Image (tube, rainbow, N blue to C red):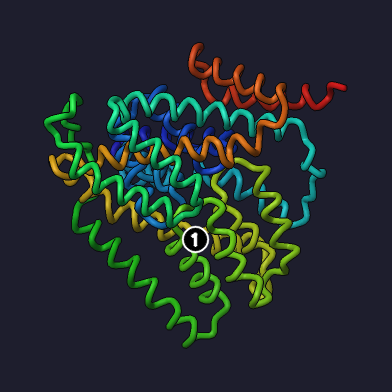
Amino acid sequence: MPPGRFSAVLEVLAVATRLGLTSFGGPVAHLGYFRSEYVVRRRWLDEQTYADVVALCQFLPGPASSQVGIAVGILRAGLPGGLAAWLGFTLPSAIVLVLFALGVRGLDLSAAGWLLGLKVAAVAVVAQAVWGMSRTLCPDRARASIALLAALTVTAWPGAWSQVLVIALAGAVGLRLLPGSGDAGPVPAHASVPVGRPLGIAALTLFFALLLALPALRYLTRSPAVAVVDSFYRTGALVFGGGHVVLPLLQAEVVPPGWVSNEAFLAGYGAAQAVPGPLFTLAAYLGAVMRPWPTGWLGALLALGAIFLPAFLLVIGTLPFWDALRTRPSFRSALRGINAAVVGLLLAALYHPVWTSAIHAPADFGLALAAFGLLVLWGAPPWIVVALSAAGGQALALLP
């Protein structure tokens, strides 16, 4: 690996690790943290390219925020950069959850003030993302209307499939009503995608081959290891929306066979709420407590790798074609509608679950306003805002 590429990989790993240690609040908040770090602070990619990557990953099954991070890492430092971005963002929470599974039991966090402060920080980060992206992606009445209609629709009919439908309809509306001649923005520059189309086709072929072959291999071998890989790979490959949507699928895979008790599953879910990073790292906890599979770190690594492997294959498979498509006039028209709808989805998520889970009193609202001001007016790094919000939440909890 050339020295310049190696240093870029290390840079991606360092930045992603900091995000993995501080990105609380779920997948929508993660997109806000990513935008603050990758677009605003470091300028690794521009607002339009970031929005296009988010739109692409919204279409793909799997953990959308993790896929966005992998894509940014690939664009920055090639395939090793994508792996570094995933490792940095995923391992902090995965390690904590495995330690919890191995017997490290913490205190009851249900009333922890610092945890509420972290949720309040997520409100500020998502609000900043909605504000910044709306100014770029919804600069006219038509696209602002698409964003509002998207927000209203997914609020009235929540669920992963409603989000996919809204994005598809917004793309059709953009193709029909938002032609390129009405766009004041420049044609997006070609992003340097260090993945060729042959490798992309091979990754997509492997994605579908594993999806079909693993169940047959599981039946033929009766191997517990193959069964674990099949269950977690299928979960990662078929879940749309990511985040909390994966919970019922995971529960159906591990509880009925008796691999994990329902009580242990719920305990792991509760622990996953108190750590940063993607909720998909719950797979590491489940792999560590699973039976009769050998528990511990080996089971955790197997389950974690299997559930994230589809995300890697899909991102590698689609990126080479995404850059060519997004510069075509017709596809750009569709992307205008899609990006406006993504802003609407973020707006809806800002209300629920981000706002509704964090703002319960005037003091919570005041803390959120202060965090928002630090981000927008003073340009404070998100990790500093997270730390100050956690301290502020703990201070509020100590007040009479």
Camera-side residue: 72 or 273?
273
Camera-side residue: 42 or 148?
148
Quarter assignment of residue 178: top left
Going by the image, does 387 lie left or right of 395? Answer: left
Q: Residue at x 51, y 42 (%)?
A: 89
Instruction: Looking at this view, name the residue that lies furthest to the right.
Output: 400
Instruction: Looking at this view, name the residue that lies furthest to the top.
Output: 378
Task: Specify whether residue 1 is in view.
Answer: no
Does residue 216 sit above or below 364 in this rendering? below
Quadrant in the picture for the C terminus: top right
Q: Amino acid at mark 1?
A: Ile
Q: Residues within 10 Å of mark 1 (few under 14, many from 20)?
A: many
Q: Residue at x 51, y 76 (%)?
A: 226
Mark 1 sits on what residue? Answer: 307
Q: Position of residue 278 (x, y in %)?
A: 54, 47
Q: Residue at x 41, y 37 (%)?
A: 344
Going by the image, does 31 lie left or right of 102? Answer: left
Q: Residue at x 38, y 53 (%)?
A: 164
Q: Position of residue 166 (x, y in %)?
A: 37, 49
Quadrant in the picture for the N terminus: top left
Task: Specify whether residue 157 is in view.
Answer: yes
Q: Position of residue 83 (x, y in %)?
A: 41, 47
